Image (cartoon, rainbow, N blue to C red):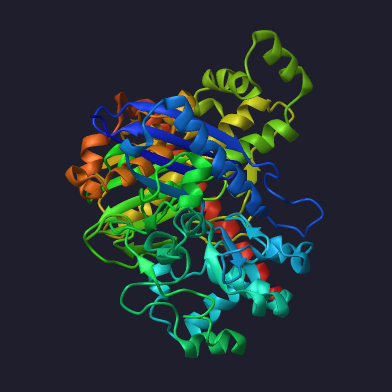
């Protein structure tokens, strides 16, 4: 009798599920559901990015039920469920797990809603935490690249506390959305080592920041650990709980089906490609990007998002770096800076505007494009960890064409990726093999060739359009006794395309020179922005 696993992936704009035959690797069925409210930004202060948790519930029930119905799989043959979610994406809930925005008292309060990963209104709070950590020589600061990201858990909690102490006091738990979804599925509150370690300043040796630090940050935070922040942290190799009767009735799953603790969405892609060993790097390329490397050694690396022991694979350290704007800057460009005539031509040719610009950008060689851009349309994650940095395009003239800018933006994101790889390698993380997944890796050949040329690395691709959901299905398969660990399940179920992208020697040489310009410009503008911030303080 065939056995299956269910992977559930919550992205920025939609959720998707996939049912996988764990022996043949066949994706039996998939389902996608877009969030009704999308990303909530209208009528809110700058850099706010909220979501409505009701969208997650609606999507969860739909995609599971729809997937099972389309697959004709007997739910009793589904051995386990894996979940991943964008992070750090948090919400305040009461003791029953009810989001506070569902309550009449807080229905019109933006701080009661989900703060999405790209809610960047918390840079001030992140700076406060970083400065205090440096002043007090906090032992955990090196784990997070010497800087606190505004995307993390504590800056978002501090923002809520400052804005509305009543809401803060009424909050029973601040919880990652991924952990909340697993709570819905199992009826049991647990917290994953993956998100907690990377996004909530937690490690297995010392836990969260100590009371003394939190009291200095704000006296009202002194006792948050163990009250509004749970200390029940589970490894991905553990079981978070089991499908409840209520969820079984609403989705078609069998009551008692085991559920794993959730991945961060980008991290879920590693087992989909078999990335489970030291020396391997995975790039997840979409609206933003993550660059995750594994090592058997612990080391502090300035500018990265962090590292966590057992964060993905038991016994290994997982290191994360990233860029908060990749596909997003291309979307910004086509929506705001592309001539109407290009849209008309794209429609005539029956292609999307992105495809049209890509084809025109393909015929531009690296040495022909005089533009150099900085990929900071949504701030910088690695290496500057500063949401206040903004994008730049240098070299524009009256003769500059749209496709040249489009290509320069792609190149800028590739330079940002090379910067991350260089930082890893300069600090002792071997990068022997590079893998890529995500919508861009799947669809855009020019993008991937430029990445190979710029980084000088051969790039292996995922052979599934649902890299994160598939990876979550791999984690779900670990509940089958023959697939008892993530490395074993990953080795049996990994999906890699038979071809790779290899550097073009001529382009590689040209890009090495352009990359040096990118680094010099980055340093110049990043230091200038830092100087401006200090003057304002």
Nearest to the observer: residue 402 or residue 510: 402
Q: Is residue 282 visible?
A: no
Q: Residue furthest top?
A: 348
Nearest to the observer: residue 42 or residue 371: 42
User: On the rendered structure, is 61 left or right of 427?
Assistant: right
Location of residue 127 with respect to 474 vertically, above or below: below
Nearest to the observer: residue 353 or residue 100: 100
Q: Is residue 151 visible?
A: yes
**For the point 57% across and 65% down, which residue is it?**
97
Instruction: Indicate the quadrant where residue 316 lies.
Output: bottom left
Relative image position of residue 234 (x, y in whole percent): 35, 65
**For the point 22% across and 50% down, which residue is it?**
485
For the C terminus, the quadrant is bottom right
Location of residue 154 with respect to 404 vertically, above or below: below
Nearest to the observer: residue 245 or residue 398: 245
**For the point 17% across and 43% down, which residue is it?**
482
Relative image position of residue 503 (x, y in whole percent): 34, 29
Instruction: Indicate the quadrant where residue 512 lies.
Output: top left
Relative image position of residue 451 (x, y in whole percent): 42, 35
Relative image position of residue 1 (x, y in whole percent): 23, 29
**For the point 43% across and 54% down, which residue is it?**
321
Q: Residue furthest right?
A: 43
């Amino acid at each position: 009798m065939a056995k299956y696993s269910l992977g559930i992936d919550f992205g920025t704009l939609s959720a998707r599920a996939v049912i996988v035959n764990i022996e043949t690797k066949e994706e039996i069925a998939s389902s996608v559901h877009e969030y009704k409210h999308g990303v909530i930004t209208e009528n809110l202060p700058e850099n706010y990015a909220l979501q409505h948790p009701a969208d997650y519930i609606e999507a969860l029930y739909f995609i599971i039920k729809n997937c099972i119905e389309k697959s004709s799989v007997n739910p009793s043959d589904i051995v386990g469920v894996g979940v991943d979610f964008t992070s750090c994406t948090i919400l305040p809930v009461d003791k029953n797990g009810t989001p506070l925005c569902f309550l009449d008292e807080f229905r019109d309060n933006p701080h009661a809603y989900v703060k999405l990963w790209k809610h960047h209104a918390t840079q001030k709070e992140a700076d406060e935490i970083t400065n205090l950590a440096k002043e007090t020589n906090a032992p955990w600061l090196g784990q997070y690249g010497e800087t606190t990201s505004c995307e993390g858990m504590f800056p978002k909690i501090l923002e809520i506390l400052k804005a509305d102490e009543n809401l803060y006091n009424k909050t029973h738990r601040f919880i990652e959305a991924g952990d909340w979804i697993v709570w819905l599925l199992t009826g049991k509150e647990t917290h994953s080592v993956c998100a907690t370690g990377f996004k909530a300043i937690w490690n297995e040796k010392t836990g969260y920041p100590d009371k003394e630090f939190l009291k200095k940050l704000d006296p009202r935070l002194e006792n948050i650990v163990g009250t509004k922040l749970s200390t029940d942290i589970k490894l991905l190799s553990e079981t978070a709980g089991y499908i409840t009767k209520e969820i079984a009735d609403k989705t078609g799953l069998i009551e008692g089906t085991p559920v794993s603790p959730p991945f961060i969405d980008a991290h879920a892609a590693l087992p989909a490609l078999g990335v489970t060993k030291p020396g391997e790097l995975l790039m997840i390329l979409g609206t933003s990007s993550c660059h995750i490397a594994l090592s058997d050694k612990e080391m502090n690396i300035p500018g990265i998002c962090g590292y966590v022991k057992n964060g993905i694979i038991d016994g290994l350290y997982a290191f994360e770096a990233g860029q908060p704007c990749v596909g997003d800057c291309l979307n910004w460009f086509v929506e705001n800076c592309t001539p109407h005539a290009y849209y008309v031509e794209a429609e005539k040719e029956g292609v999307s505007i992105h495809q049209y610009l890509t084809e025109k950008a393909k015929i531009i060689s690296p040495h022909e494009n005089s533009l150099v851009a900085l990929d900071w349309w949504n701030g910088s994650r690695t290496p500057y960890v500063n949401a206040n940095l903004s994008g730049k395009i240098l070299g524009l003239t009256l003769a500059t064409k749209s496709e040249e800018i489009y290509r320069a933006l792609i190149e800028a994101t590739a330079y940002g990726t090379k910067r991350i790889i260089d930082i890893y390698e300069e600090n002792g993380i071997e990068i022997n093999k590079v893998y890529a997944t995500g919508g861009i890796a799947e669809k855009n050949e020019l993008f991937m060739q430029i990445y190979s040329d710029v980084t000088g690395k051969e790039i292996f691709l995922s052979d599934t359009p649902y890299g994160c959901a598939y990876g979550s299905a791999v984690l779900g398969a670990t509940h089958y006794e023959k697939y008892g660990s993530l490395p074993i399940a990953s080795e049996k179920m990994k999906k890699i395309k038979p071809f790779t992208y290899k550097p073009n020697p001529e382009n590689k040489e040209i890009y090495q020179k352009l990359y040096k310009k990118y680094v010099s410009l980055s340093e110049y503008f990043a230091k200038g922005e830092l100087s401006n911030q200090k003057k304002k303080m």
